[in-house]
Image: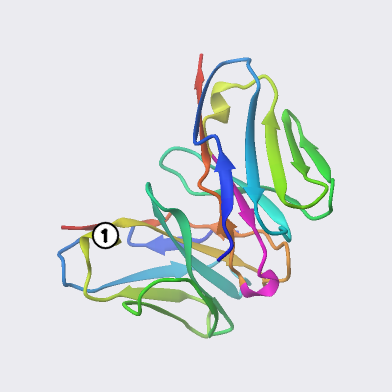
């Protein structure tokens, strides 16, 4: 079945450094959603990308969808301790059947 | 507006027992999905219900089942529990499931099988 790969699995950064997580698929992705899960918490929706080559920004977060719709990335500029958590990408490939296929997630640790 | 509510939050069961988890979606949401989260396998889709009908099912054994009631509340049941069923079970609700609809997750039920 379809798999969504996400790298790296873990990332430790110093506060103020940048961070990027990558999401890849061997098949074309439909819509990519990004979620953040704080330690001990539940996934919270960040954003959705739909169009090939789409770039969206939320303050220090930049989300990109690849031209071939087979990859996506999330970049955080100047990380803060509040950015700590696990970031997941998820393919909304099945459209109207409620199934999200999640990547394994990237856990971000930020040292103050 | 109240969020997605899952009960109980924590549960300890013995191998061979069965368990029922409950999920109350956000008011007005008709789609409820269930996910299993483990450190090794990540977030895996179990099934999704919309207007009391199961529309999609993940690759889990038949011991995992669910249902949805007319008020959109959903339950999932796991029978003959195994140690490997220990996980965080997350429920997510959406108004509907048109492509790109945001999923709102509950806090989850942490199930430990001993």
Picture coordinates of residue A6, whole percent (x, y) = 57, 43
Relative to A75, residue A94 above or below: below
Q: Is B102 drawn above or below residue B57 in the view shown?
A: above
Write the residue at 53% across / 81% down: B71
Rendered image quadrant of residue B63 = bottom left
Q: Which residue is mark 1?
A: B84
Q: Is residue A34 magenta?
A: no
In the rendered structure, the residue with mark 1 lies on which chain?
B
Check the image and report above or below for B7 versus A42.
below
Residue B81, percent across and down? 22, 69
In depth, the one of A70 and A41 nearer the eye is A70
Q: Is residue A4 visible?
A: yes
* A57 displayed left or right of B21: right
Report the side of B17 relative to B55 (left or right): left
Looking at the rendering, the stretch of residues picked out in magenta corresponds to: A87-97
**Could you classify mark 1 by the number of other residues whose Cα lies within 10 Å: few (under 14), some (14-19), or many (20 or more)?**
few
Looking at the image, which is closer to me, B16 or B13? B16
Q: Is residue B73 left or right of residue A34?
A: left
| Residue B11 rendering spot, x and y as whole percentages | 25, 59
Spot occupied by residue B54 in the image (x, y as percentages of width and height): 52, 82
């Amino acid at each position: 079945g379809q798999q969504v790969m996400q790298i790296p699995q873990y990332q430790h950064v110093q506060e103020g450094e940048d961070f990027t997580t990558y999401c890849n698929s061997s098949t074309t992705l439909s819509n990519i959603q990004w979620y953040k899960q704080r330690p001990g918490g539940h996934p919270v929706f960040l954003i959705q990308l739909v169009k090939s080559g789409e770039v969206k920004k939320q303050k220090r977060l930049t989300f990109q969808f690849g031209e071939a719709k087979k990859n996506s990335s999330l970049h955080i500029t100047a990380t803060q301790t509040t950015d700590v958590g696990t970031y997941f990408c998820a393919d909304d490939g099945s459209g109207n059947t409620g199934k999200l296929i999640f990547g394994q997630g990237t856990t971000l640790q930020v040292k103050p | 507006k109240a969020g997605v509510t899952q009960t109980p939050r924590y549960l300890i069961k013995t191998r061979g027992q069965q368990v029922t988890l409950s999920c109350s979606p956000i008011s007005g949401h008709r789609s409820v999905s269930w996910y299993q989260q483990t450190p090794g396998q990540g977030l895996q889709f179990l099934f999704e219900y919309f207007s009391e009908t199961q529309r999609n099912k993940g690759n889990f054994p038949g011991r995992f089942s669910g249902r949805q009631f007319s008020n959109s509340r959903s339950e999932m049941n796991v029978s003959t529990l195994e140690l490997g069923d220990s996980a965080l079970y997350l429920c997510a609700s959406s108004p509907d499931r048109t492509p790109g609809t945001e999923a709102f997750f509950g806090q989850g039920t942490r199930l430990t099988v001993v």
